[in-house]
Each structure stands twice: as structure tokens, then as C-alpha cells.
Image: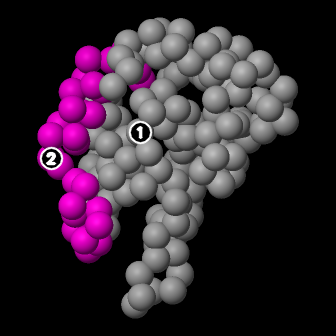
Amino acid sequence: MQTFTTSSNPVPRLQQVLDLIDRMTEVKGLNVPQIVDIEKLRSLPIGTFGRNWVDFLGKNNLKPFTTGSRRKQLHDGVHILTEYGVDPIGEAEIQAFLLGAKLQLTNVLLGLGLLRVIHQNLNYQQQFSWSRLWQAYQRGRHSQFDPDTWQPELLWHLSLTDVQKIFSVINK
């Protein structure tokens, strides 16, 4: 995820949301040890799901999520599976996909926040379309993907295409 700031709030709002999510999952006892090991993934062959993961992080100048729940720590893997971007529109598509796969209030709230970011930025407004979100939602509905139970650490050695087939995440 990228960090979005506003002129009225110099503190990145996304980091505030992520910190809140960590506190909520800690209270619920859902936090887990770090899952994504960059060096392990970097040692995998090119074309594997795990190598795609580390390459995605590098290409987008991101660090893996290392705290919080499994669902949060594995968020970047959903980007890799779906091939949605890390800009606000891509993040909104991720939330729509996740809503289709397994309805959760968190995804509704994150999606609404992203729609607000998109609405406040003319460039994103021009790129945005409701049909993209609907397609992402339908893609999630028709997938075999459960964001709470998937175990990418068992799949890192497989090709990205094979992992997409396992979850019926048809390439867009």
C-alpha cells in the first residue's frame, strides 16, 4: 500500500489506519509473527509466486507488512494474485475483490476511504470507473479465494499462473 497524505494532515492517514488495525487485531488475539521473509522469497526462481512477491515489493518500493494479522501481512499477495495496482484505484479494486471473496466490514470501510481519496484527486477521478470495481467484486465472487485461510507460504514455489488457477482468480 502507498501512503497518502493531505495538506491538512501531514501525518500519513494510511499509517494511522494500519496502526488502528494492528491495535484492533491485537485486542482480538489475531496478530501473528512475521510471515513474509524477503530473503527467502528472493532466493526463489524467477516466475514463482514467491519471487513475484518480492519483485512486486521492490518494483513498488514497498516493504512487506510484518505486524498484525495474517490477512494484513498477506495483503500484498492479493495484489500479486489479482495484478491490481497500488494506486488508490488499484487498492479500491483489491477491496472490491475481497468483498466479493468474503464480505467483511473492514473492506467496506477501507473501500469507502479509498473512494474519498479518488474523489479528492482529479487525476484519479479521470481514471476511475464503477465498472472496474464491479468487475473486481465479481472476480472475487467467482474465485475460490478465502483471504482468512489461504496459505501463500505453501505456494511460494509454484508459478503465479498455477496459484491463480488454484484460487480461480482468472487473469484480468
Amino acid type for the residue under numbered disc 2 = Trp
> Mark 1 highlights which residue?
84
Residue 12, percent from left and from top: 52, 75
Label 2: which secondary element: helix
Q: Name the residue located 41 percent from the left edge and 39 percent from the top edge.
A: 84
Q: Amino acid at mark 1?
A: Tyr
Q: Which residue does the image show at 17% across and 37% down from the upper left?
A: 134
Circle 2 is placed at which residue position? 130
x and y, in percent, of residue 136 in the image: 27, 34
Q: Which residues are magenta?
A: 119-147
Q: Earlier in the sequence, mark 2 or mark 1?
A: 1
Residue 35 pos. (x, y %): 71, 35
Q: Residue at x 56, y 18 (%)?
A: 160
Which residue occupies the foreground of this view, 165 or 128?
Answer: 128
State yes or no: residue 131 in magenta.
yes
The furthest residue to the bottom? 8
Q: Taken as a whole, is the magenta stretch helix, strand or loop?
A: helix
Label 2 and label 1: CA atoms lie apart by 15 Å
The vertical placement of 67 against 5, above or below, is above
Colour mapping: one colour
Residue 12 as seen in the image, left or right of residue 102: right
Q: Is residue 99 visible?
A: no
Name the spot of residue 68 as percent of width and height, x first: 61, 49
